[in-house]
Image: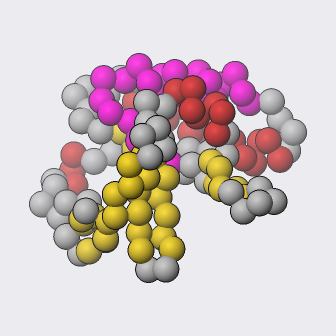
């Protein structure tokens, strides 16, 4: 984050369950003049509900649709899992891919951090400093 940003202009919502996350996304549609929406760990509660064998695909699709229809750019982070071959995928990968314009995979291997835009294969090395993220 930019240290010069006025923190009074940032809305932080801490959802403790899937229903709170859904309600928070629904309320964001009423917020005027947003410049960016970040939903950190969007799939946290999705993953829990899937493990509990609860069907939540329709409300998750509604939530993703509401986010896509917002006038501001939206960044969604997702938890990941690995398959038997060691490949990593975001939880809800097919669902998220339907709504994403771009998918960025962040990796930290051998002290090297890379952001890869999966649709183009472009790799961007980056570092994190006290002043923020630097390419």
> Compared to 42, does 70 lie above or below?
above
Q: Where's the N terminus, which quadrant?
A: bottom left
Q: Residue at point 28% right, 48% down?
A: 10
Q: Residue at point 66% right, 33% down?
A: 94
Identify which residue, 98 or 75, lies in the foreground.
98
Q: Is residue 15 magenta?
A: no
Q: Position of residue 99 (x, y in %)?
A: 52, 27
The residue furthest right is: 53
Whether residue 102 is visible here, answered yes or no, is yes
Which residues, given as a range, are shown in magenta? 56-77
The residue furthest front is: 121
Identify which residue, 56 or 114, lies in the foreground.
114
Q: Residue at point 26% right, 33% down?
A: 34
Q: Residue at point 67% right, 46% down?
A: 91
The residue furthest left is: 4
Q: Position of residue 129 (x, y in %)?
A: 26, 74
Display coloring: secondary structure
Identify which residue, 88 or 16, lies in the foreground.
88
> Compared to 6, does 73 lie above or below?
above
Is 135 left, or right, of 16 in this rendering? left
Please tell me in which quadrant of the rendered image residue 19 appears.
Answer: top right
């Amino acid at each position: 984050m930019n240290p010069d940003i006025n923190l009074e202009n940032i809305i932080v919502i801490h959802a403790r369950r899937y229903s709170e996350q859904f309600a928070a996304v629904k309320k964001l549609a009423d917020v005027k003049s947003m410049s960016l929406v970040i939903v950190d760990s969007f799939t946290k509660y999705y993953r829990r509900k899937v493990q509990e064998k609860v069907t939540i695909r329709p409300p998750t699709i509604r939530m993703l649709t509401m986010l896509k229809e917002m006038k501001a750019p939206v960044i969604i982070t997702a938890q990941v899992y690995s398959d038997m071959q060691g490949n990593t995928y975001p939880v809800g990968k097919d669902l998220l891919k339907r709504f994403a314009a771009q998918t960025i995979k962040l990796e930290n291997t051998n002290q090297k951090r890379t952001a890869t835009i999966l649709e183009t294969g472009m790799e961007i090395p980056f570092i994190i400093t006290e002043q923020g993220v630097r390419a």
